[in-house]
Structures are given as structure tokens and as C-alpha cells.
Image (cartoon, helix red, strand yellow):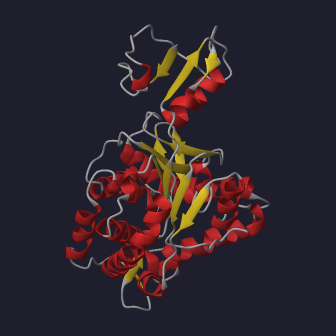
Amino acid sequence: MFGFSLDEQGANLPQQYGPWTSFKTIELYHDEPYQGVDVTACLEDISKHGFHLTAAHRRITHLAVVNERALVLGGGGAAGNAWLIGIIAGLFDGGLDVTKADLIIGTSAGSTAAAQITSALPTKLLADILSAAPQQQTGSMVSNGGRVPKGSADHLEKTSRIIHEAEGASDMRRRLGAEALAMAESSDNSVQMRWRDTVAARLPRQEWPERMMFIPAVDADTGEPAVFHRHSGVDLVDAVAASCAGGFAYRIGDKRYIDGGYRADVNVDLAAGYKRVLVIPPLGDRTRKPRDWGLHLSAQVDELRAHGNKVETIFPDSDSEHALGAGMNMMDLTRRGHAAQAGYNQGKALAEQISQFWR
């Protein structure tokens, strides 16, 4: 039996097939054959599971993978992030810890929540939100008396127009990428540095967790979807900053990326193969994209269920919807406390019901 891993010590190889002995180091590249190795299968397994197993030259990775539970967290701005933390903390206090999922997928603001709940207790994260003083930003006044980031309304209008004019999902991503690249060109490098510092300050820890976590984004230059994980060679802070890059294109190395919500609204499809999938989307099933593109939440949930996956969703209830607001109001930092508390109340009330599905 042979095991392939990016971990030089092979620490993540399945122990039931151990003990493992280091054999040799090889370099594999897509579209380049390597004698005795199915390169495509090997790289695919490592990307998804962190390792690739063969026995008598047969791929047996699936025998060692426990694809039991996946947690999927959607985007929704500053308020949406707080609501996600509240929901998860409420479930936790109700006796259900969903942070121990085998896979966590976080998109945009959900990627921040994913990184947060894998490095701190959800109740501690909630307490930090509730104890924080209301934060003020320069920007345009919104109806509730709070403030949203300067230029956000113009950006929303511009991206909505691009989406409306696009001929399909791929065309949309390319156009949005081009717009973000133009914005990046007109700003200096300090914008990127400040954004990275902002994201880093939100994370209790800046290392990838041991459990599998996917953070989607979109390559701004090509429009191709990208999915970051702990074997991608990308820092966690950069992965989250890229997935949350709703304006300018965020640079990682020689590539630049935009918001993971442009890959798909919630990216539930990345949980394919997991028996139970819990989806928590602050935006519910709302979408700005044409529904016939199949990128909205309900389309991807239907696809998973059609393949035998059990899927449960937690949409904001009426109190949570009121606390979250809509549109640019969800970017308002002063809504975070109310959104977190509403999420906590909803999560705790749902804990027993969700436990029956999750366990």
C-alpha cells in the first residue's frame, strides 16, 4: 500500500493502515504523467482529502475517508457574520457543537466565520461581539441610523448591472474580475495591506485548522473558480481576504481574486459526497444572479438531495431578518450585536431539532 501526502511526515495518513514509513519525495503536475501514479486521481484526492491511497495500483482513498457531516456558511456582510456566530453559539449552548463537522465550507463573510469557529469557542466569539462598542465608519447614512462603507451602494449597483448584462456565469465572473482588477489598478498597495490587516485581526488564530475547510474565491484574471484549503499553499488570512474581496481584486502571489460568492451564492456543491449537510445562509435563498444559471442555494441543495445527501438549512427567522436588515444594511457594523443576539436565540431554539438531523 502507498500513501501520498503533502505532509512530509505523513501525519495525516489514515492510522488504520499504519504504521507509515517515509519512502521518497516526488513532484506531480497536472497534465504531466508520472510512472506508476495516476496523477489526476492523486492530485484530486489530495485537494479534497489531504491524502491519496493506493493498493496494488488501485485507488482506495474512498475506503479511508469518513465523509459524514459538512457545515456550510454563507456570506452576508458584517451583520451576516455576527448572525452566523450567534446561530452556532446558540446551537452550542443547546447541546449541539457543529464546529466538529468533518468539512466546513465558508464563503465571503462565511469564510471569516469558518476560520473563527475553528479556532475559538463560539460562545467566546459571541461574547466578544456583544461586548464590543458600536463601531462607526465614514460612509453614507442608512435608514437605521448606522453607517455602511463608503462607496458600497455604488459598488452594489455596478456589480448588479454587470450580472444583468452577463451572458452566463463564466462571463459574469470574467466581467466582475475585470472590474475588480481596474479598481485595484487605481489604488495603491496600502489598500491591500490594510484589508489583510483587518481580516487578520478578526481571526483568533491565523493557521489552518486540522479538519478540512474549503474557502472559495474566483480568479479575477481568468474568471475561473478557486477553492482554498490547508494544502493549497495559501495562508488562511489570505484565503479569507480573497473570499471576502467584494470590491478590488485581492492579490495572492501573482494571482488576484474576488469574492467567493461569485463562484456560487453559498457553494453548497462543494459538500457533495457528505452524508449530512447543514447549511446556514444569512441571505437565505436570495440571489442577484439569474436562477437558470443554477448558482442559487435551492438549486444546489436540490442537486445534493438528488444524489442521496441529507441537507438541512437554517434560514433567518423573522427576528433575525429584522436584525440583519437587507442589501447594504448588512454591511453596517452597528447591526452586529443585534444580529448576533437574534442568531443566538434562533440557534438555541433549534438545537434539539437540528441535533436529530446532525447526530
- Left or right placement of residue 112 versus residue 256 in this view: left
* Total tally of numbered discs in the picture: 0
Q: Nearer the viewer, residue 292 or 210?
A: 210
x 41%, y 84%: residue: 323
Question: Does residue 340 sit above or below 301 in this rendering?
Answer: below
154 vs 104: above or below: below
Between 278 and 176, which is closer to the camera in this rendering? 278
On screen, 337 above or below 53? Answer: below
Residue drawn at x 46%, y 23% as measured from the top left: 5
Query: In this orientation, which residue lies closer to the viewer: 340 or 70?
Result: 70
Q: Residue 349, image x and y in percent?
A: 39, 78
Please name whichever residue, 162 or 104, is drawn nearer the observer in this view of the structure: 104
Relative to 175, residue 254 above or below: above
Residue 140 lies left or right of residue 315; in this view the side is: left
Q: Quadrant of residue 276?
A: bottom right
Q: Position of residue 91 (x, y in %)?
A: 36, 68
Quarter of the rendering containing residue 143 = bottom left
Q: Position of residue 211 (x, y in %)?
A: 39, 42
Quarter the C terminus occupies: bottom left
Q: Position of residue 235 (x, y in %)?
A: 38, 40
Residue 132 in the figure: left or right of residue 80:
left
Asked whether residue 153 is in view, the answer is: yes
